[in-house]
Image (tube, helix red, strand yellow):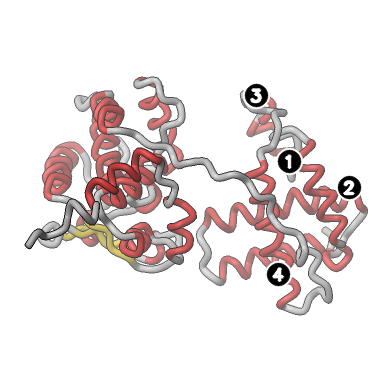
Amino acid sequence: MEKIDLEVDDFINYCDYKNLSTKTIGSYEQTLRLFIRYLQEECKITRTEQVKEQTIKDYLTNIKERGKYTVVANDSSKRFNNPQNRQDFGKKVSMATVNNYTRNLRVYFNYMYDSRLIKVNPMKKIKPTRIPRKAKGYLNDKDFNNLLKSFDLSKFHEYRDYVITQLIFDTGMRIGECLMIRDETDINFNERTIFLPADNTKGKKDRYVFFSMQMATELRRWLQYRDRYKESEFLFCTIKGSQLLERSFESNFTNYGERIGNKDISPHLIRNNFAKRFLMNGGDIYTLSKILGHSSVKVTEECYLDLQTEDLRIQYQKHSPLMNLKRA
């Protein structure tokens, strides 16, 4: 094992000590293990301090040119993951993915530089590529109602997913946060709030989300149904009573999207719809930022201030100064 492997181990342990989310740590580690392999095989580099700015530029070019999943950190993993069987195997790596690698590498080298483990930060002048923003996907009322009608409510898992979909739509929660709710300790029906403890949130901060009277009715009905058949501490459990995993729900959700002819539908799309509808219904972006659990209002602005001309027209009609003028 080379020194750079140990340096990355120390960084990952530091991230764990800082209580970063498992998903974030996993992203860092995947990026760095692939980077280490490139350094060792293509550049004969064994220590982080040997990495130069040009080394990183060459690596990012390599990422752009290679196909998806054609390189792995450990060849033995191919026997289990079979990346060659993926439909997108070998296809072009998106600029969004390249930018994600760039951000992850910056975090690592900033850590090494701030810890005085390297004298020069090779990432100092390397910036992510600007990508034109695409408007967030949107489901109109008809599309969302068609989605709800696609669930078979006679089946335990589809009824559960039907309620989850409405809860995300009503609260703006992330799917991972939703699946960790414990009904005995986290839900307050009197105040119609759900407590999300720091350990369960992306930002590692406690927060509350809020649900409507209609959602309260749906949740009570679901709890009565669930308790007839399963015992579980989790609001949304599997058929066996265990915690429902995020990837399992996402897999189910892909099938629901195919039923209504929308392959792009996802739990995150439902969260996006909550945000846009909140703004369109007169909610302010500062409140929205708190509800969504963003680290700052700037993050919320970058994500959701992409209203289209029709959205602006509707908003204007609600708030026209002349129309709202009180006549003497």
Which residue lies under the disc numbered 3? 85
- Of callouts 1 and 2, the N-terminal one: 2
Which residue lies under the disc numbered 2? 41
- The local secondary structure at tag 3 comes to helix
Could you tell me if residue 262 is visible in this image?
yes
Q: Position of residue 56 (x, y in %)?
A: 81, 55
- Of callouts 3 and 1, the N-terminal one: 1
Which residue lies under the disc numbered 4? 110
- The local secondary structure at tag 2 comes to helix
Q: Is residue 132 above or below residue 151?
A: below
Q: Residue at the right extreme?
A: 44
Question: Dot 4: few (<14), some (14–19), or many (≥20) neighbours within 10 Å?
Answer: some
Disc 2/disc 4 C-alpha distance (Å) = 24 Å
Name the residue type under label 2: Glu
Which residue lies under the disc numbered 1? 72
Name the residue type under label 1: Val
Q: Residue at the front extreme?
A: 328
Name the residue type under label 4: Asn
Q: Quadrant of the N terminus?
A: bottom right
- The local secondary structure at tag 4 comes to helix
Q: Residue at the left extreme?
A: 328
Tell me: 148 left or right of 133. left
Disc 4/disc 3 C-alpha distance (Å) = 37 Å
Are discs 1 and 2 less than 8 Å apart at CB?
A: no
Count of all numbered marks drawn on residues in the image: 4
Q: Is residue 38 above or below residue 139?
A: below
